[in-house]
Amino acid sequence: MDNFIHTLAPFLLLLILWSLFWKGLSLWHAARHGQSWWFVILLVLNTIGILDIIYLFGVRKLTFSTLFSK
């Protein structure tokens, strides 16, 4: 069991970093545009970044190059 945990740890770390990246980006965009409902939904639901990506590219209609611009 100990070996399994050590094998799985890097994958879990990457998954956590992936999720935090998309969560932070989507929350920032929702807050910046006054979309409080989206902010609450994105804050409460953990979907490993899937809902966050849908919000950014589907609802906000952003392109990858505009994700980090003001």
Image (tube, helix red, strand yellow):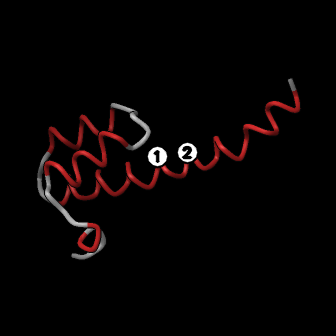
Give neighbour class at mark 1: few <14, some 14-19, many 20+ (Cα, 10 Å). Answer: some
Badge 2 element = helix
> Where is residue 21 shown, x and y percent of the image?
44, 55
Residue 16, labelled with which disc? 2
**Amino acid type, callout 2:** Ile
**Amino acid type, callout 1:** Ser
Q: Quadrant of the C terminus?
A: bottom left
> Where is residue 26 shown, x and y percent of the image?
29, 52
Residue that protrudes farthest toward the top in the picture: 1
Labelled pair 2, 1 in contact (Cβ < 8 Å): yes
The structure residue drawn at horizontal position 24% and vertical position 34%, both measured from the top left corner, is: 41
The structure residue drawn at horizontal position 39% and vertical position 44%, both measured from the top left corner, is: 49
- The answer to whether 63 appears left or right of 47 in the picture is left
Residue 1, labelled with which disc? none
The structure residue drawn at horizontal position 28% and vertical position 67%, both measured from the top left corner, is: 64
Residue 42 against residue 68 in the figure, above or below = above
Hey, which quadrant is residue 37 in on the image?
A: top left
- The answer to whether 25 appears left or right of 41 in the picture is right
Residue 2 against residue 55 in the figure, above or below = above
Mark 1 lies on residue: 19
Badge 1 element = helix
- The answer to whether 19 appears left or right of 27 in the picture is right
The structure residue drawn at horizontal position 81% and vertical position 30%, both measured from the top left corner, is: 4
> Where is residue 1 shown, x and y percent of the image?
86, 23
